[in-house]
Amino acid sequence: MSSYRGILGIVALLLVAWALSSNRRRIPIKTVVGGIALQWALALLVLKTEPGRAFFDAIATVVTVILSGADEGAKFVFGHLASDGPVIAGVKIMSTIIVVATLSSLGYHYGILQRVVRGMAWVMTRALGVTGPESLSGAANVFLGQTEAPLLVRPFLVGMTRSELMAVMTGGFATISAGVMAYYISVLGRHPPFTPVIMARHLMTASLMSAPAAFVMAKIMVPPGDEARPGGHVAETAPILSKNGLDAAAMGAADGMKLSINVLAMLVAFIGLITIVDKGLIALGGLSFMRPLVDAMGATQLNLDVVLGWVFSPVAWLLGVDGVDCTAYGSLLGKAMATNEMIAYRSLGDLARDSSMAQRSIIMATYSLCGFANFSSIGIQIGGIGSLAPERRGDLVQLGPRAMLAGAMASWMTGCIAGMLI
């Protein structure tokens, strides 16, 4: 039954995107069909074939080694504060992002990252019929963040069509960067039967699957017009600024520090806001005229998790989530969109620790939450991409909310497909 609901969920997400399309008669069928086919192919490769699982497990093992290296660096600097425990979440976040950013910078300096990204872009250009610059940015988003990936196509941003710009933005919303992904592995992989290797495999697969899904949603909602350039040309990457490997490592560490401070600031701000809103809702739910409504909805008290669960539980049901988990799953989806995915993954980790959600639902949520699709990221993209192409700031502002919703639906479709195969 859940598989049938999954198919219904995919159709529903595509229909919502079509209903919000800027031109329903120009939907590029090749991109939509090719994107969904590529998404399914990747899911089947990893979730249903032994070679695919073994390949991604090997990569996941490397990622866990990187995490252990980040832990050792943190222990040297912070001592006992870097031991396991919730009190040092900030230390783990900072150390993980810095180490991954350093390795990414080294990979870019030696041309490794560019070759991998360009290979993926080549596949997407031919399979989906999209242009070189947008395919390059979409491929880069599997590893880089929503403002770092556009750097690879900076010379092309000014001349991009609105459809291409929509694809660039949606790709940023639908995927996550390697730095934060490594932290989520440490959050989700500490509660049996889930291990760091298993969660690394799922998170990497999720980000990879959502890259073509982002093109599907973006091209339905803002189809290419007569002004769109033909595909087939892969853009040149941004120049290498580091002088040698040591310089690249230093630059990566500095960039990682900036990113980690921004992430920590966002966590402090949003967790603080959530607590304030929660206390207000609890007080509201305790009023005499609200108590019967709260009781009728089957809740012990009114809080943000309950409200978001009510709103997004229909989405969870459509995605094929088991009925008993729909409210909790819906709350995670809403929390990721209203605040950010880091807070949602933190809540998912708590559910896994307490065995409060079925294993299948936990894995599905791991896929569905794997993206930067939240309201604060709209401002981040407008500021980040707008600084690279100030002339396009007006288009970025107009496309921001639509691209964010497209990115969220791309991630939800990824979670839906994963749920049908596990």
Image: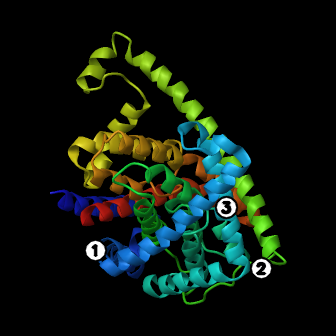
Q: Where is residue 246 in the image (x, y as percent from the top left)?
A: 81, 72
Residue 223 drawn at (x, y percent): 48, 72
Q: Say whether disc 1 or disc 2 marks the residue closer to the N-terminus.
A: 1
Give the mark nearer the N terminus: 1 vs 3. 1
Q: Which of 243 and 335 is in front in this view?
A: 243
Which residue is most to the right?
A: 243
Q: What residue type is labelled 3?
A: Val
Amino acid at dot 1: Lys
Is residue 158 visible in the rendered image? The answer is: no
Q: Which mark is residue 67?
A: none
Mark 3 element type? helix
Identify the residue position indicated by label 1 in the image: 48
In primary-sequence order, the first of circles 3 and 2 is: 3
Using residue 113 as the reference point, say whether residue 330 is left or right of it. Answer: left
Q: Is 108 drawn above or below residue 185 in the view shown? A: below
Q: Estimate the spatial distance between the alpha carbons at disc 1 and disc 2, rounded to whole Å.
A: 39 Å
What SS does tag 1 mark?
helix
Dot 3 crowding, Cα within 10 Å, few <14, some 14–19, many 20+? many
User: Are the residues tagged 1 and 3 within 8 Å (C-beta)?
Assistant: no
Residue 86 at x, y = what percent? Answer: 54, 38
Q: Distance between the residues labelled 1 and 3?
A: 32 Å
Of the two numbered discs 3 and 2 in the rendering, the one whose residue sits closer to the viewer: 3
Q: Name the residue under label 3.
A: 99
Alpha carbon of mark 3 to alpha carbon of mark 2: how far?
22 Å
Foreground disc of the pair 1, 2: 1
Q: Name the residue under label 2.
A: 239
Q: Which of 279 and 27 is in front in this view?
A: 279
Label 2's element? loop
